[in-house]
């Protein structure tokens, strides 16, 4: 697999923009005497206007973009779980608040789109279709197959974030301003949820990002994490990865059909690994 040094080099590349120019030829027309309106005659050499149908980005372009969109998150120590100003709608799942240290890692600024999923998998299971909308109706098991193929195609060891990494990134990492939702105390600014979504997903990156430049960490779709669900009382203090075994995997962030309470940074959910829903997708992560 490619090294982190390669990743940093790619992230540092300048994006070149191809610019095109269209020449416009105007023939000089001399109006006849006493004629107020003239109509130019058609020239035998007049160029035909050809309309071409725009095609979407190629698979290579989508894969390259997936690499460029990875954001480095400087490691640090933070308080994970139910903190001031938040609510625990799952009856204790987010408690107790506890100190956690995570190592530096990379996480995508966007949820995985339907265009990227289709480029890798050759199909699109989503209920709400749109190339730039988040892919959904994907199970945890589906995500593992997608990630395996993505690793082969790119040479990078893409994976799901751990729950501790996900929450640290949602809080803004070491740039955190202490918001109760990822990027704001006003949910309307940062999340598509039942209060503003019109009960559908939306294009990724359409609202404000959080302190790290990450979009849709609250709302749009819940996001799978790598961990089995476990109690915080048994969680290690350094780079926790969840229990070794379990029946369900963690989902985080809230979704288009979820309540405000499900969008709090501390809110936890879980699902069985072979089940996909139209409100659940994923976000890429990468170890440093």
Image (spheres, rainbow, N blue to C red):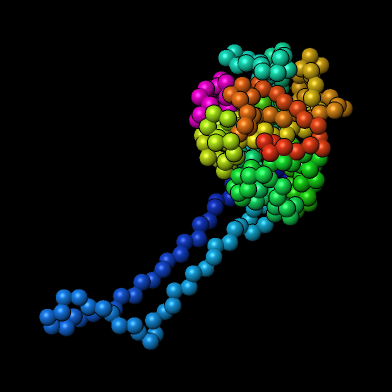
Displayed quadrant of residue 111: top right
Above or below residue 229? Residue 54 is: below
Q: Is residue 285 left or right of residue 29?
A: right
For the image, the number of numbered tags is: 0
Q: Is residue 135 above or below residue 264?
A: below
> Residue 203 location in percent, x, y?
57, 43
Compared to residue 180, the image places residue 5 above or below, namely: below
Residue positioned 58% across, 50% down in the render: 13
Name the residue located 81 percent from the left edge and 28 percent from the top edge: 248
Left or right: where does residue 3 sit relative to residue 259?
Answer: right
Quadrant of the image containing the C terminus: top right
Residue 84 visible in the picture: yes
Question: Which region is colored magenta?
Answer: 174-189
- Quadrant for residue 56, please give it: bottom right
Residue at horizontal 60 percent and vertical 39 percent from the top: 201
Q: Is residue 135 left or right of residue 213?
A: right
Quadrant assignment, res 157 = top right
**Residue 175 part of the magenta-drawn span:** yes
């Amino acid at each position: 697999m490619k090294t982190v040094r390669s990743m940093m080099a790619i992230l540092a590349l300048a994006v070149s923009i191809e610019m095109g120019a269209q020449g416009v030829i105007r023939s000089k027309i001399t109006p006849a005497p006493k004629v107020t309106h003239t109509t130019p005659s058609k020239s035998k050499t007049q160029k035909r206007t050809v309309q071409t149908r725009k095609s979407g980005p190629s698979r290579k372009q989508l894969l390259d973009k997936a690499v460029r969109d990875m954001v480095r998150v400087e490691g640090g120590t933070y308080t994970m779980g139910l903190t001031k100003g938040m609510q625990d709608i799952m009856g204790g799942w987010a408690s107790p608040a506890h100190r956690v240290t995570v190592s530096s890692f990379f996480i995508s600024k966007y949820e995985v789109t339907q265009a990227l999923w289709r480029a890798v998998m050759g199909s699109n299971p989503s209920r709400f279709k749109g190339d730039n909308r988040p892919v959904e109706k994907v199970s945890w098991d589906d995500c593992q197959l997608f990630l395996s193929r993505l690793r082969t195609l790119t040479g990078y060891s893409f994976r799901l974030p751990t729950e501790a990494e996900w929450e640290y990134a949602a809080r803004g990492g070491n740039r955190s301003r202490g918001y109760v939702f990822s990027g704001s105390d006003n949910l309307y600014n940062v999340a598509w949820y039942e209060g503003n979504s019109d009960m559908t997903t939306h294009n990724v990156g359409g609202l404000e990002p959080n302190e790290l430049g990450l979009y849709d960490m609250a709302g749009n779709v819940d996001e799978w994490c790598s961990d089995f669900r476990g109690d915080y009382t048994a969680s290690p203090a350094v780079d926790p990865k969840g229990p070794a075994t379990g029946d369900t995997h963690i989902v985080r962030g809230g979704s288009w059909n979820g309540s405000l309470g499900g969008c709090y940074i501390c809110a936890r959910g879980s699902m069985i690994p072979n089940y996909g829903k139209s409100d659940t997708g994923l976000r890429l992560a990468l170890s440093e």
